[in-house]
Image: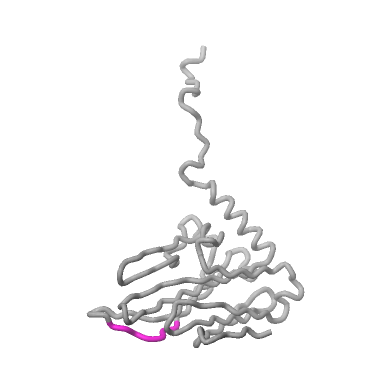
């Protein structure tokens, strides 16, 4: 059944994402005057017919995603002219070899000049995947940079779509659990100093 859209959406952008032995057609619906957007997903061929353990999730809050929490640094900033929430800043260095960028596309809608500065009203789409499950996992991030001309304010919001097989999601869970205890302050095993036995005290 096709997605019914109201007047809140007046633009769309479509992508075909290879997945397993088939593909997904992903539609991104948004408004040229708003940072709000939604995804629509349709599968082709063998994506779901032979692999019924494929799961699809959408995240309006990227910080709630285990993929983002594990692998990515997010950027937040707020002042009078700029409001950014959960923008992808970088891949965490310790995971450079574990995930790949597979997609990076930008659609520029308009340009706005504020004083001597030029701001772009645009949609940018990033695609990331797990290195060992490139054909079984995709994390698609749509970043909407919207200009409120009346206020000379730039709003940046992100929404994500995650598609993964059971095997890929199991690996993601393992990475997530490992990240909770690996190299983070306060998680290492600590022994009270007054209970440590020094070698020179042993007779």
- What residue do we see at 54% from left, 70% from top? 160
- What residue do we see at 51% from left, 11% from top? 203
Residue 15, quarter of the rendered image: bottom right
- What residue do we see at 40% from left, 78% from top? 146
Instruction: Determine if the magenta segment contains residue 111.
Output: yes
- Closer to the camera, 151 or 131? 151
Q: Position of residue 9 (x, y in %)?
A: 51, 85
- Closer to the camera, 30 or 42? 30
Q: How many marks?
A: 0
Q: Residue 84, relative to residue 189: is it above or below?
A: below
Specify the segment rendered in magenta: 107-113
- What residue do we see at 65% from left, 80% from top? 42
Q: Residue 108, relative to residue 131: is it above or below?
A: below
Q: Position of residue 122 (x, y in %)?
A: 42, 81
Q: Residue 189, relative to residue 153: is it above or below?
A: above
Locate the N terminus and report the quarter of the image it occupies.
bottom right
């Amino acid at each position: 059944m096709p997605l019914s859209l109201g007047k809140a959406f007046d633009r769309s952008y479509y992508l075909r994402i290879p997945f397993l032995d088939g593909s997904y057609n992903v539609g991104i619906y948004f408004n040229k005057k708003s940072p709000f957007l939604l995804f629509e997903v349709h599968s082709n061929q063998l994506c779901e017919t032979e692999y019924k353990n494929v799961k699809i999730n959408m995240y309006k809050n990227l910080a709630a995603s285990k993929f983002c929490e594990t692998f990515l640094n997010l950027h937040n900033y707020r002042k009078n002219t700029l409001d950014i929430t959960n923008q992808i800043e970088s891949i965490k260095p310790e995971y450079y070899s574990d995930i790949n960028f597979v997609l990076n596309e930008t659609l520029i809608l308009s340009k706005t000049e504020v004083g001597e500065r030029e701001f772009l009203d645009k949609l940018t789409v990033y695609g990331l995947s797990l290195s060992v499950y490139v054909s079984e996992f995709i994390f698609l991030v749509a970043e909407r940079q919207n200009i409120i001309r009346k206020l000379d304010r730039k709003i940046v919001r992100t929404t994500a779509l995650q598609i993964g097989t059971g095997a890929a999601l199991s690996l993601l869970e393992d990475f997530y659990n490992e990240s909770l205890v690996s190299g983070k302050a306060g998680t290492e095993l600590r022994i009270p100093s007054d209970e440590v036995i020094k070698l020179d005290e042993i007779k």
